[in-house]
Image (cartoon, rainbow, N blue to C red):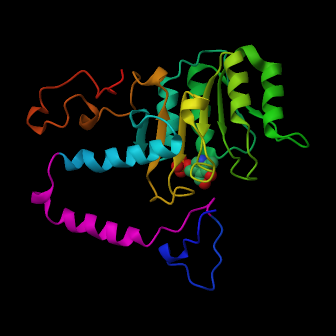
Amino acid sequence: MLPCQRHRFQIPRDHCYLNAAYMTPAPTDFIAIGEQSLIERTKPWSVSPADFFKRSERVRSLAAQVMECAPTAVAIVPSVSYGVATAARNLPIQKGQMIITLAQEFPSNYYGWDRLAKDRGAELLMVPGPPEQDWTEAILEFLHEHGPRTALLAIPHVHWSTGAMLDLPRIRDAARHHGAALFLDLTQSLGALPISLSEIDPDFAVAAGYKWLFGPYSLGYLYVSPRWQRGIPLEENWIVRAGADDFSQLVAYQSDYQRCPAL
Ligand SMILES: Cc1ncc(COP(=O)(O)O)c(C=O)c1O
């Protein structure tokens, strides 16, 4: 059992704040760290090219520890919808195929797929809310019924509106059986529930960081399976190109992205 962490937060004694599913309170450490960053911005002469990479690499490795995967499989993203858009850009969904999500899914795990389905002539279907059975059984039944046309299952680990938990290994097996890709929204579970992405092996998984990870707003984490790590990003930013850490060579334009060492 984790010992009491109250001393790390500025929660008034007469407050009992439990709504981490909405937003966690930032730990008090945030204030000193934020202040330090602002002070650094007033002294750009003290910022070296290596500083552009050091912190993001540290954040990536911390996220990878919680996701139980290689740091090179994690991209820092501003939101879940950005993760959905990145996956949508890379998944080869075709005309006539189906994308499946859950009824009353959080909108960021709906709108991007809705757009993709419309653009490709595919169909977006929602597994109806389970009246008696659980979500896992409802998804397995739905797949059994619609199986062969399913190209993608886009689901959460924990449903945002009820807290219901899904059995990911069973769903992953069923998705594989039908040849469907698996996209996970871990926003309502990562940090609160253990997960091993190396073991579950989804195609993509994303989490916003300001809930159970106690992070700032606008910092999220996208896991990309090695199967998709040679894909295309949403934006062609210079910092993700090969050799970006050598600022003297930035206009020696590179067609390669920074590669994960294992690839
Ligand atoms: C399950 C789930 N996904 C995603 C989000 C946030 O999405 P985004 O980062 O696109 O704003 C929330 C916020 O409540 C959520 O509960």
Question: Is residue 68 in view from this perspective?
Answer: yes
- From the top left corner, tell me how far across and down residue 57 is, in percent: 32, 44
At a point 66% along the width and 36% down the height, the residue shown is 155
Span highlighted in magenta in the image: 20-49
At a point 30% along the width and 32% down the height, the residue shown is 236
Taking the image as shown, residue 229 lies to the left or right of residue 169, namely left
Residue sitting nearer the eye, 85 or 43: 43
- From the top left corner, tell me how far across and down residue 158 is, in percent: 69, 46
Question: Is residue 80 in view from this perspective?
Answer: no
Q: Is residue 22 magenta?
A: yes
- From the top left corner, tell me how far across and down residue 136 is, in percent: 78, 35
Give the quarter of the image for residue 20. Answer: bottom right
At a point 20% along the width and 62% down the height, the residue shown is 41
In the image, residue 36 sits, relative to residue 46, either above or below, namely below
Give the quarter of the image for residue 198. Answer: top right
What is the tally of numbered marks visible in this picture? 0
Q: Is residue 21 magenta?
A: yes
Taking the image as shown, residue 241 lies to the left or right of residue 128, namely left
In the image, residue 109 sits, relative to residue 36, either above or below, namely above
